[in-house]
Amino acid sequence: MTAEEIRNLVMAGLPGAEVAVGGDGYHVDLTVISDVFDGLSRLKRQQAVYATLDAAIRSGALHAVNIHASTVAESRASGRD
C-alpha cells in the first residue's frame, strides 16, 4: 500500500485527524493526531486507529503497524506538531 492509501484509510475513519505515514508500505509507522483521542487510554487510541486499517491488515496488504496517537494538545506539548 502507498502512504497516501494508508493516510486516506485513517482519515476516512477518523475525520479531521492529522496523519503522517512512514515505513515501506508493508511495515508502517503512523503518527495520528486528533482530539477524538482525548480521554482515551493508549490501548483505546491504538484500537481506534487499527479499526481504520482492519481490512488492509486482514488482507495482508499491511503487516506491521507502529502507532503513535495523540491529541492536538499532547502533540504540541511534545513538539510533534
Image (cartoon, rainbow, N blue to C red):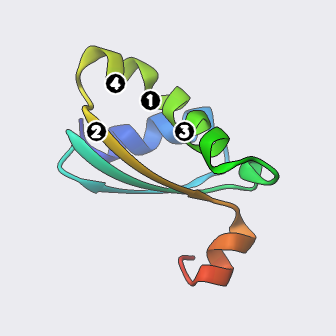
Task: Using the rendered view, name the quadrant where residue 76 is placed.
Answer: bottom right
Q: Residues within 10 Å of mark 1 (few under 14, many from 20)?
A: some
Query: Which of the pair 53/41 is nearer the observer?
Result: 41
Q: Would residue 49 be found to the left or right of residue 3 on screen?
A: right
Q: Amino acid at mark 4?
A: Ile
Task: Using the rendered view, name the quadrant where residue 22 is placed.
Answer: bottom left
Question: Considering only vertical position in the picture, is 4 above or below 35?
Answer: above
The residue beneath circle 1 is 53
Q: Residue 32: where, in percent of width, then height?
A: 54, 55
The residue beneath circle 3 is 49
Q: Tag 3 or tag 4, which sits nearer the N-term?
A: 3
Q: Amino acid at mark 3?
A: Val
The quarter of the image holding the N terminus is top left
Q: Tag 2 or tag 1, which sits nearer the N-term?
A: 1
Give the residue at x 27% y 31%: 62
Q: In what element is the residue under mark 3?
A: helix
Badge 4 vs badge 1, beta-carbon distance below 8 Å: yes
C-alpha gap between disc 2 and disc 3: 13 Å
The residue beneath circle 4 is 57
Question: Considering only vertical position in the picture, is 28 above or below 9?
Answer: below
Given this view, does label 2 or label 3 mark the residue nearer the observer? 2
C-alpha gap between disc 4 and disc 3: 12 Å
Badge 2 vs badge 3, beta-carbon distance below 8 Å: no
C-alpha gap between disc 4 and disc 2: 8 Å
C-alpha gap between disc 1 and disc 2: 11 Å
The residue beneath circle 2 is 64
Instruction: In the displayed orientation, state which residue is furthest to the right.
Output: 39
Q: Residue 39: where, in percent of width, then height?
A: 82, 51
Q: Tag 2 or tag 4, which sits nearer the N-term?
A: 4
